[in-house]
Amino acid sequence: MPCARHDFAYYNVRKLASSEQWKSQYKRTVDKAFSSDMLRSCDGLFTVKKAACKVVAWEFYAAVTLGGK
């Protein structure tokens, strides 16, 4: 679900906001919500799986932060 919500926001908010607003304000907010959603999806796991899930969540967050447009 985190990816679908993030993709939805990227697609729709970018259409509603100016390019400058997207870059300066909304992209950061959308990416942070994605990070929170990804980390929350790890909550039901235990020990090693939970730790691995959080590593992957942070890697995905880094990817969208650095590469998302």
Image: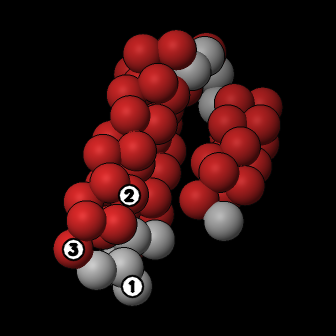
Judge the density around disc 1: few (<14), some (14-19), many (≥20) Cα neighbours within 10 Å. Answer: few
Q: Nearest to the eye among marks 2 and 3: give it.
A: 3
Q: CA distance from mark 1 to mark 3?
A: 10 Å
Q: Contact (CB < 8 A) between labels 1 and 2?
A: no
Q: Decide: is 21 above or below 9.
A: above
Residue 61 visible at all: no
Judge the density around disc 3: few (<14), some (14-19), many (≥20) Cα neighbours within 10 Å. Answer: few
Going from N to C along the chain, the mark reached first, 1 or 2, is: 1
Q: Nearest to the eye among marks 1 and 3: give it.
A: 3
Disc 3, SS: helix
In the image shown, does 35 or 59 lie closer to the viewer?
59
* Residue found at x 75% / y 49%: 8
Q: CA distance from mark 2 to mark 3?
A: 10 Å
Residue 33 drawn at (x, y percent)? 43, 55
Which residue lies under the disc numbered 3? 47
Which residue lies under the disc numbered 2? 53
In the image shown, does 45 or 3 lie closer to the viewer?
45
Q: Decide: is 62 above or below 8.
A: above
Q: Tag 3: residue type?
A: Thr
Residue 30 drawn at (x, y percent)? 49, 44
Disc 2, SS: helix
Q: CA distance from mark 1 to mark 2?
A: 10 Å
* Residue found at x 46% / y 37%: 60
| Residue 10 falls left or right of residue 40 | right
Q: Tag 1: residue type?
A: Gly
Residue 39 occupies which quadrant of the picture?
A: bottom left
* Residue found at x 21% / y 74%: 47
Q: Tag 2: residue type?
A: Cys
Which residue lies under the disc numbered 1? 44
Going from N to C along the chain, the mark reached first, 2 or 3, is: 3
Q: Decide: is 14 above or below 39.
A: above
Residue 61 occupies which quadrant of the picture?
A: top left
